[in-house]
Amino acid sequence: MMRKRVKKFVKISKKKDFTRVVLFVLIFIFFILVFSLFYFSKSKSEISFCGDGTLGGKCSDLKPYFCLNGTLVERASVCGCPELLSRNGNLCLSKYQSNPKNISLEYILRGERGEINFVVYEGMYNYMLNIPSSFYYFNGNESFRQNFKLKKINEEEQRELLMPLVVGIQNAAKDKTNQVRIAVSLVQRIPYKESEKTIVVGFERINYSRSVYELLYEMQGACEGRSELLAFLLRELGYGVGLFYYPIEDHEAVGIKCPMEFSLNDSEYCFIETTGPSILSNSEEYYLGLGKLSSEPEVIFISEGDSLGNDLYEYKDVKDFIKLSDLVEKKGELNIFRHYKLKSLREKYGLQYKINL
């Protein structure tokens, strides 16, 4: 009888030991999983990226920039320089980088004001002034318009000294859509002024159009130069870009690739006015002395690239703004609720009442 009890006790002890081992293993696995999840989430949060998508501690595809703590900084000694520039320590310098001048480019993002400080150079300004006018102008044949637009935007020496502005936008916002918003607002807020210069092309005297760099150096410009500047910035930020040219009004605006349903005339480009603050995709602005644009625009292709998404708040804001603006034009006043809504939209985008043309 005693022997049987011992055997039973041994069996019970073995079961308890096995249960303890299983429980210990499960607890151990649980703590390993918790630790792994904590460590992974912590490591992931500590991984930094820059506004162009470059991983922290790595060189950007754009020389000489290095991603340091989420900010693109010049590190030519590590990342090298573009072919047209020469290295001086951690900087890449252009031969046209003489007599610097600081400018401040303001923007509004969801009602908040910001600014990007940028350095322009008299040497590059004079270089652009001295490029023969025939480089840019043509006899009005529309088939040549795209080529000349691309020549103006693609000028290589100019591009190298404009890229720090692109980097400034990428450092101001990590989110790509916010980078678009900053670029749009920044260009729209440059003071509007047509050049007083004229040039002779063939037998015709026409108004002089500033290059992109001239516009920034002088901090003023009309629709053509401003649209070329915005097209350049959006292209370098990675987006599909076009230009809208309105022949009757002789007006130019920018198109950025977007979903068909929000695009202008099913062009797959959303309209962006550049001569004054305006909501992205609003092609029904009122222009001083003109009203709304009425002619059919020519679409000038600039670059392939990313598209805006389907969920931008601008799409709804434009509908509300157009509806409220039309009511003001027809009735001259709004009720208190509509007045507050229109006021909020104006503050959100820093809008004017009418656009220059």
Image (cartoon, rainbow, N blue to C red):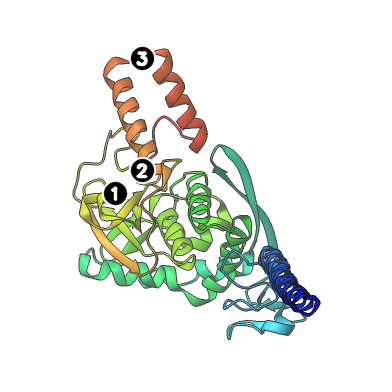
In the rendering, at what x and y percent does residue 11 appear? 72, 76
Q: Residues within 10 Å of mark 1 (few under 14, many from 20)?
A: some
The residue sitting at 59% across, 59% down in the picture is 174
- Label of residue 262 in the image: 1
The residue sitting at 59% across, 55% down in the picture is 173
- Label of residue 315 in the image: 2
In the figure, is residue 181 to the left or right of 321? right
Q: Residues within 10 Å of mark 3 (few under 14, many from 20)?
A: few
The residue sitting at 59% across, 63% down in the picture is 51
Question: Looking at this view, is 337 or 270 the one in front?
Answer: 337
In the figure, is residue 355 to the left or right of 121? left
Q: Which element type, helix, strand or loop, lies under badge 2?
A: helix
Question: Looking at this view, is 213 or 115 the one in front?
Answer: 115
Residue 309, compared with residue 137, is above or below; it is: above
Of the image marks 1 and 2, the number of the one nearer the N terminus: 1
Label 1 to label 2: alpha-carbon separation: 7 Å
For residue 14, what is the image quadrant? bottom right
- Label of residue 333 in the image: 3
In the rendering, at what x and y percent does residue 90 appear? 75, 78
- Label of residue 335 in the image: none
Q: Which element type, helix, strand or loop, lies under badge 3?
A: loop
Three-letter code, disc 1: Phe
For residue 210, what is the image quadrant? bottom left
Residue 268, compared with residue 292, is above or below; it is: below
Q: Which element type, helix, strand or loop, lies under badge 1?
A: helix
Q: Quadrant of the N terminus?
A: bottom right
Q: Residues within 10 Å of mark 2 (few under 14, many from 20)?
A: some
